[in-house]
Image: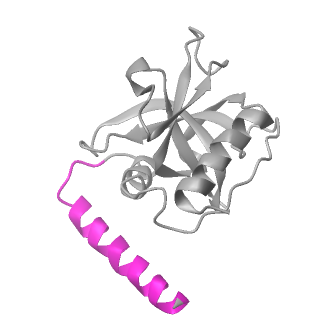
C-alpha cells in the first residue's frame, strides 16, 4: 500500500506542476502552500506534537506568519497567522490558519482559541480545523507567539475527534 501511495503522490504532484505552468509564477514556497492547502485536514494520517522552542524556527505549538493561498483563488496569497501543529518532514511543518473574524464563532470548522500576542489588536481568534497547511519552513516569515499547552490541547483534541489524528 505504501508504494501505491508514493506513486499516487508523484502522479498528483506532476499533474499539479503541469497545471501550474499555465499560471503566473509566484515563489516556490507559495506554490507548495497553495498546492498542499487544497487538501482537507483528515485526508492523511497526521501526528500532532507540542514542542515550542525559542530558536527562530517554526515549531509545533507556535503561531507563525506565512503566506496562505485563498481556497477559491489559489494564485492570491495573504500573509496570516498559522498555528503549527506538527511536522510533515524535515523542511515542512503542518499548520492551521487563524482568523479574528467574529462570524467564525459557532462555525463547526472553526475553534475559538481566544486572544494572544499574534493579534496586535488583542482580538479573539479562531483556528480552522478542516484545512491543513503544509508549509515549507523557508516560506514562514516569522514566529508570532507560543500557544499555551492547555489551548493547544483543545485544538489537538478537536483534530483527534474530527479526523483521527494521532
Q: What residue is rendered at 45% in x and 37% in y?
A: 67
Residue 11, placed above or below residue 19: below
Residue 165's quadrant in the figure?
bottom right
Provide residue 39's location: percent of width, then percent of height.
39, 58
* Relative to 100, 24 lies left or right: left
* Relative to 91, 36 lies left or right: left
Tell me, yes or no, if residue 63 can be seen here: yes
Tell me, yes or no, if residue 57 can be seen here: no
Q: What residue is rendered at 42% in x and 77% in y?
A: 9
Residue extending farthest to the top is 121
Residue 23 lies in the magenta-colored region: yes
Q: What residue is rendered at 29% in x and 37% in y?
A: 76
Q: What residue is rendered at 61% in x and 34% in y?
A: 64
Provide residue 154's location: percent of width, then percent of height.
68, 40
Provide residue 29's location: percent of width, then percent of height.
46, 50
Residue 54's quadrant in the figure?
top right
Magenta span dominant secondary structure: helix
Q: Which residues are magenta?
A: 2-25
Residue 124 lies in the magenta-colored region: no
Decide which of 42, 81 is in the foreground and name it: 42
Residue 7's quadrant in the figure?
bottom left
Q: Which quadrant is the C terminus positioned in?
A: bottom right
Decide which of 97, 28 is in the foreground and name it: 97
Residue extending farthest to the left is 22
Provide residue 32's location: percent of width, then percent of height.
43, 55
Display coloring: one colour
Amino acid at each position: 500500500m505504501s508504494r501505491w501511495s508514493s506513486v499516487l503522490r508523484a502522479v498528483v504532484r506532476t499533474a499539479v506542476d503541469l497545471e501550474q505552468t499555465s499560471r503566473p509564477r509566484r515563489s516556490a514556497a507559495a506554490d507548495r502552500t497553495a498546492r498542499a492547502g487544497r487538501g482537507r485536514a483528515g485526508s492523511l494520517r497526521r501526528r500532532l506534537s507540542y514542542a515550542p522552542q525559542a530558536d527562530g524556527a517554526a515549531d509545533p505549538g507556535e503561531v507563525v506568519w506565512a503566506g496562505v493561498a485563498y481556497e477559491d483563488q489559489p494564485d492570491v496569497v495573504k500573509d496570516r497567522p498559522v498555528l503549527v501543529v506538527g511536522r510533515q518532514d524535515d523542511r515542512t511543518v503542518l499548520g492551521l490558519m487563524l482568523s479574528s473574524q467574529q462570524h467564525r464563532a459557532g462555525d463547526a470548522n472553526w475553534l475559538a482559541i481566544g486572544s494572544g500576542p499574534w493579534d496586535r489588536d488583542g482580538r479573539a481568534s479562531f483556528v480552522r480545523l478542516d484545512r491543513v497547511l503544509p508549509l515549507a519552513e523557508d516560506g514562514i516569515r516569522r514566529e508570532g507567539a507560543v500557544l499555551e499547552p492547555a489551548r493547544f490541547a483543545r485544538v489537538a483534541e478537536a483534530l483527534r475527534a474530527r479526523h483521527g489524528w494521532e
